[in-house]
């Protein structure tokens, strides 16, 4: 299972829960690999249930590199699950931010980066029985974000 944005919010909890089932090996696809390693320890993820891999969705070459590294890591086994969870949410920034490829940050990370990732992995996933791709669209995974219309989301992520 690949989980993007696995070092915080919903991605963090998703990766932790899946790793503890004993049924999945989780690839934590993240910008900050050191943070993800700390998170895995904080969440008590079993050592043999996950790995951390670098993925910067705001850089399309990084997406391509991640896919190449993932394919080398997993060898001939097809990918069975892809959870596209990572996102940036910056509603109060006065000026737009841009990706390395020149796209507005929200579009580049939340949409274009994941679109490329899915497209590069689709052929591989088509070889897996019962493969699934999940696209997450939520700002409620982090308690420090402000929802549209200044609604303060308070997600109950369980224990």
Image (cartoon, rainbow, N blue to C red):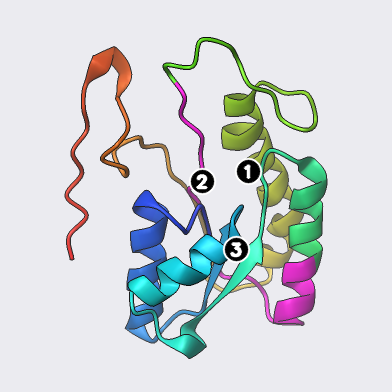
Q: Looking at this view, is 41 or 139 the one in front? A: 41
Report the mark closest to the observer, 1 or 3.
Answer: 3
Q: Picture quarter containing residue 15?
A: bottom left
For label 2, the residue is 86
Residue displayed at 68% across by 71% down = 127
Residue 115 spot, x, y in % from top left: 66, 40
Give the residue number, with chain letter if any, for mark 1: 114
Labels 2, 1: front one: 2
Q: Residues within 10 Å of mark 1 (few under 14, many from 20)?
A: many
* Label 3 sits on residue: 33
| Picture mark count | 3
The C terminus, quarter of image: bottom left
Q: Label 3: state its secondary structure.
A: helix
Mark 2 secondary-structure assignment: loop
Residue 82 among those drawn in magenta: yes
- Mark 3 closeness class: few <14, some 14–19, many ≥20 residues within 10 Å: some
Mark 2–mark 1 Cα distance, whole angstroms, equals 9 Å
Q: Is residue 119 magenta?
A: no
Residue at x 69% of width, y 81% of height: 77
User: In the rendered view, would you say 148 is above or below 39?
Assistant: above
Residue span colored magenta: 69-90
């Amino acid at each position: 299972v690949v989980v993007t944005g696995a070092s915080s919010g919903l991605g963090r909890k998703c990766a932790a829960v899946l790793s503890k089932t004993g049924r999945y090996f989780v690839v934590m696809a993240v910008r900050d690999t050191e943070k993800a390693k700390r998170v895995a320890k904080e969440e008590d993820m079993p050592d043999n249930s996950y790995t951390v891999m670098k993925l910067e969705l705001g850089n399309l070459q990084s997406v391509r590199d991640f896919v190449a590294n993932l394919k080398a890591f997993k060898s001939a086994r097809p990918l069975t699950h892809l959870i596209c969870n990572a996102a940036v949410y910056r509603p109060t920034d006065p000026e737009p931010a841009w990706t390395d490829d020149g796209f507005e940050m929200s579009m580049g990370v939340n949409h274009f980066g994941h679109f490329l990732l899915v497209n590069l992995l689709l052929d591989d996933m088509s070889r897996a029985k019962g493969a699934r791709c999940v696209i997450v669209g939520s700002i409620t995974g982090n308690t420090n974000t402000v929802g549209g219309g200044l609604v303060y989301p308070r997600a109950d992520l369980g224990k």
